[in-house]
Structures are given as structure tokens and as C-alpha cells.
Amino acid sequence: MTTLEHVGAPHSPGLPTASLRLAPALYAATLFASALLLFAVQPMFTKMLLPRLGGAPAVWSVAIVVFQAALLAGYAYAHLLARTLKPAHAALLHLAVLGLAGASLPIGIAAGFAAPPESGVVPWLVALIAVSIGLPFAALSASAPLLQSWFAASGHPQAKNPYVLYAASNVGSFAALLTYPFVVEPLLTLRSQAWAWSLGYGLLAVMIAIAGLLATRGMPPARTEAEQAVPPPTLAARLRWIALAAIPSGLVVAVTAHITTDIAAAPFLWVVPLALYLLTFVALFRDRPWVDHATAARLAPIAVAPLAVGLLDDSWLAAIIVSLAAFMALALACHGELYGRRPAPARLTEFYLWTSLGGVLGGVFAGLIAPNVFSGTYEYQFLMVAALVALPGAWVGGWRHAARIAAGAAAIVLVVTVSRGAFLRLGDATHVPLQVGLLAVGALMLLRRDRPAEVAALAAIAFVVTELWRPGLTRIEAVRSFFGVHQVVESADGQFRLLYHGTTIHGAERIRGADGAPTDGRPEPRTYYYFGGPLSEGVAAARAARDGTLRVAAVGLGTGSLACHKRDIEDWTFFEIDPQVVRIARDPALFHFLSACAPDVPIVLGDARLTLAASNQAYDLIVLDAFSSDTIPVHLLTREAFAGYLSRLAPRGIILAHISNRHMELGRPVAAVGASLGLVTLRKQDESVTDPLQELRANSIVVALARDAKDLAGLKNQSGWRSIAADSEVAAWTDDYSNILGAVLRKKLP
């Protein structure tokens, strides 16, 4: 490997002393500003997309892949400029490109992308992002390698290691990601954010012009000879760069999807893994790294072990913290190895080009390929094992030794898979032995942490076992769509069948009695939909106000449990965004709610905000029951969304919003939205279910809204329903403004 010390930039006699002294500060400040804008626009623009795509976590996954592709395009363009043009010409051309990209400002969604198609959502989303923001993003991306290459040629004494400027760039990225959810999002509307970003873009262009001027005055004439003295990297070196960049890049997409599934598709959660990812560059791309490479390699197995053996499955907060710690340790290990294999400055832009390609490949695997190949989020576990394999020392014994370890792990996995049925038949008798076995595997991972290949094999075994072994549940079917992972499972006693979206139950049906005999007749709704629960009371109150018949719009289908509240003479319509949910609910081999209670009920496919608004009917009752795992998509709770619902609500009609959530307090934002539209709001927090496992009933929180208090009289007189007024400290959410973090804090710190 060619080290940095082999090639240094000679002092340039043409650069004034004052300019020479100011050059590092100017370049660092410009890189900081460029990265600040580059990473502030990512959560800002992606938040603009959510109302069109149901608030799915996959929106951010796909967006990150497109941003990485635009980054690669920017790096390729920078590499081309650095290799073919003098700095003076390169600076002029780059300023022209920035000006062309600036003509598309302020940032917004391009025309022609009003609503996603029923199929092919991912290509549509990729095209939307590319057309709307691709050029400004790629132009900004090119600034980092270009500025570093100009600094390397400036003649400054520090120019022999321009890679340290990459740390300054990542400090800007890190600052953008931290300030966006905690400062920018709570204080500014999206429109204000877009205009502020445009102003920053203009200021950056001025800074880049000054930096380009310094580069043209300081270019040493011997640069071409210096470049020729550095041998090109070998194919093996380039492949290592790609692999070491691809694994953390894929992991940042996978871990983000993992931790956002049950909370919210929200910028404050998106940015945490990405900020940690960038922090690893800040920590390592410097003369004196914050974390020793060997230390990071030793820490990685310690963080992965509890995740591999499922030790934290019962604690979401601990699981998120350890997941992020493991991700950061693995990213530090990979990026430390990457920095150790960096080439001389003359090959700087090529190095960034190949690492950017690795970033795109990792993102494409985790964000685009895996969701279409795997029925679960297995890319997360796969990439953790791959990162362990990339640790220093994993290949010390040679490929034959690694192959023997891999073969042994594969044999154990095969045995576990084949014997899965026998374990399931044994039921509870296998719980303790399997738990003991998994704990032993975790302990062995810690004991052998200095042997990465063995740790990776043990982690792979543990991940397979924990995936196949689900205590108390038998998997019937698992399917993955753009909107999440759906699993149909049966309870261990065979009495109930359940639908999970992520880790949250979205409906349950009794299929056998306690004696094992199959049930027949009209199924009884369970979980949140049980007769006598808040949703049931809301339907009954609306029916009483309409002389016994209803026209109902139900947003969110699940298993179709709500359909069994329908009377034969009533007109009900379901609105569902996920085709896989519709298929599961309609299949009588899985659930019977639709086939038994409403076999001919129409189901409108698409985002309910768009499809409901496009309906030509007026509804007496609109039920909002759309969830992505445990989370209601935020865009369904904004002022604009409720204005759309009101346009379809008949006189004296009622809106019922199911807002149960483990992580967010949503009653006050909904009340604020209702007050802003002149609506009366009642809320009930159900506490009647004391043993949810007995009959699979669940307590819920439901809000009812109507134009007049008289329309809610039927609920006002029932137990538990209370008026809820707008809170002056909680603003109404809009498409332009929402405060997810505040909702989380109110739930966790009431």
C-alpha cells in the first residue's frame, strides 16, 4: 500500500503567505458548510414525501439509496474534473454546475408525482427523488472531494494529508443531522426550511468560488509528475475499499428500518443511525483517531452477542441502544480498516469514488434488493455477520480455515432448520434448553472475541435459531412488502390465529375452542375491536344517531376485524395502502372476518388521504385505524388530512381515530387539529381489559371528533369518554409541521 508520506505536495511559490495560512480554515469551513447543507436536505426532503407514501419506514430506506447514488455521481464527476482539468477550469465548471442546480431551488417535489402507482412504488419513488433533488444533491456531493483535491495541490504544508478535511466535512454532516430534529423541525415549517436551505446554498457557492481561486493561484506545476509517481491501486485494493464501505452503508439502512418499525417514520429517528455512521468518519479520518482500531474490533463482538441470542427482545429501549452500539462498533471497525488502506493524496478522488460505489452497493442491497428477496428484515443480521467477517484477523488462518468454520456453521444451521418441526411439537419443553443453549453461544462469542471468523459463525447460528424459534407461536406465513413485514402466526395451544405487522398484533381470530374443535359461524372481533370496546362504542353511537344504518369509511384493514361490526343493510368501504394486507384479510384459509361478515365489501387500494378524498360518497362514520406496526402514519393526523376527511363526512357524522401507541402521546395533537377545524373532541382510554392473554382483547385509546357536540351525545353519556381541549403548548400538526419528538417525550415523561 502506498502511504501518505511517500508523496507530499511541494510548497507553491505563487501563493501569498496570508492566503497560505488561511487555506486550511477556508477549506475546512467550506467543507463543513457543504456537508451541513447536504445532510440537512435529506431528512427535510424525505419528510416532504411521507404524505404521498403512507409514512412507511421504507421511504427513508429508498431515499438513502438514491442519495447514495447521487453521492456516487457527484464523486465520479469530481474525479473526472480532478483528473482532466486544471483547478481554474474545474472551479469555473463546478460553479456553473452549482448555478444550474440552483435554478431548481427552492427544494420541492417535482410536478407529475402527485400520487404513487398501485404497483411499482419503488421505481416511482426513485424517479421522484432523482428528478426533484438529484442535481443539487450531486453538485453538492462533488464539493467535498474537489475541495480536498484542490487543497492537496495548494502547496500548504498540511496538504500531504488532505483526508483530515474529510473529518471536517463529516462534522458538518453530523451537526446537520443533530440540529434538524431538535432545532429545525420543531421550529420551522417545511416551506421555511426550504427557503433557508436555498439561502445557504447561495452562500456556499460564494465560499467554493473563493476556495477555487486559492487553488488556481497555488497549483504547483509538478503535480502531474507527482501523480505519475504514485502507482494505481490494485484490483484487490479497490475491492477491499468497496467491501469495507458497503457493509456499514448497508447496515445504516438496515438498522434504521429496524428501530423505526415500531415508533415512527420520523426524522429524529432516521438521523440517529446516520449521525453515528458519520461520527465514525470524524473519529477515524484524522492523524490521531479518537478510537484505536484494535479497540473497536474487540468491542464489536461484545455488542453483537446479546442481539444475536435475543437477550433484549423484551426491552425495546435496551434493544435499540444495544443495536446502535453494535452498529457503531462495527462501522468503526470497517471504517478504521478503510482509513488504514487509504492511498496517497494523488489518488484521493479515486479512493472516494470507489468507497462511494461501495456505499451505493450496500444501500442497494439493504434498501432495494433485500425487501424483495427476504420475507423478513434478515439483511440486518446478514450485514452484522459480514461486518464481523471484515474485522482484522478474520482471515489469519487463510481461506481454508475460514471455509472450515463456515462449513461447520452451515451444518449446525441445517440441523437446526430440519429439526425445527420436532422442537415446535415439543412446545414449552424446549424453551429452557434452547435459552440455555443460546446463552452458551453468547458467552462463547465473548470468550472467542479475538477470533472474528468464529464469532461470525456463532452469530450466524444464533440469528438462525432465534428466528426459527418463536416461543408460544407457530408461523403460518410471512410476507414482506414496501410497507413492512407481515406474519400470520398461531398461538401455541392452536386456539388463536394472529396477524403481526412488525412486532405489533394487527388482529386476532379464535379458530379452535379449548377442546381443539374448529370454530364455526360468524367470528368475534378481538384485540382492539372487541364488542363493548371504545371502537365498538363509537360505531354504535354513530349508528344510533343515524336511525340504525351507516355509511362507513374504514381507513386500515388489518385482518378485517372491524367488518364484523357491520350490519347487512349498511354500506361500508375499507381503504388500505398495502396489497399484501388485502390478500391476507381476504384469504379465508387465514382469517374469516371478511368472508363471514362482509364478503362483498369494497376495498380501495392506495393511501387513504388520496383515495378517500377522491371518493364521491359522504360517510356517516370515518374510522381511522391505519398503523405501520405500532405507529399511525403522521400524515394521517395533520390538519390537511382531517380537512380531507371532513370533506367526505356527512352532516352529523363522526370521525373515530384509534391512537393507541406505545411510544407517542397523540391525543393532544389530534385535539389541536380538531380545535383548529372547529371540531368537538372526546377521548377514551380503555382500562377494562385486565387479562389480555385470556381472550386476546386489548385496551385502546380512541378519539371521537364531530362538528357539533350533539353528534357525540351518545358517547358523552357513556363511561370513560371525556372532553379533550386543545393544549396551548401543543400545536396542531400540519403537512408543513409536526413534532414527533415532543409526542415521544410526553408519552415517556408525562
Image (cartoon, rainbow, N blue to C red):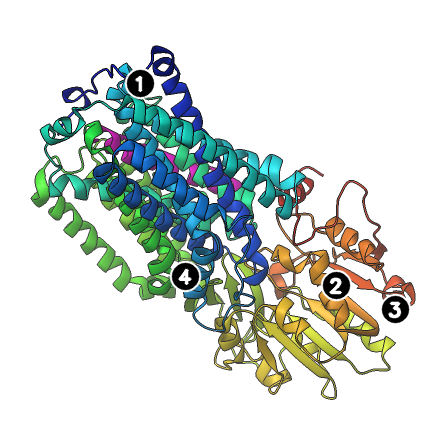
User: First in sequence: mark 1 or mark 2?
Assistant: 1
Determine the residue positioned at 43% across, 56% down: 130
* Dot placed on the residue nearer the N-terminal end, 3 or 2: 2
Q: Residue 658's x, y, as percent?
A: 69, 61
Q: CA distance from mark 4 to mark 2?
A: 51 Å
Q: What is the spatial separation of the Cα atoms under label 4 and label 3, in whole angstroms?
A: 51 Å
The part of the chain drawn in magenta is 314-342
User: Disc 3 on helix, strand or loop?
Assistant: helix
* Residues tagged 3 and 1 counted as in contact (Cβ below 8 A): no
Q: Earlier in the sequence, mark 4 or mark 3?
A: 4
Distance, label 1 to label 2, CA atoms, is 56 Å
Disc 1 is placed on an element classified as loop
Q: Which mark is residue 170?
A: none
Residue 137: x and y in percent read 43, 46
Residue under circle 1? Answer: 288
Labels 4, 3: front one: 3
Type of the residue with mark 1: Arg
Q: Position of residue 431 (x, y in %)?
A: 40, 53
Identify the element where label 2 is drawn: helix
Disc nearer the start of the sequence (3/1): 1
Q: In what element is the residue under mark 4?
A: helix
Q: Which residue is mark 3?
A: 711
Could you tell me the amino acid type at mark 4?
Gly
Q: Which residue is mark 2?
A: 643
How far is disc 3 from disc 2 in space, using C-alphas?
18 Å
Say what amino acid the circle numbered 3 marks: Asp
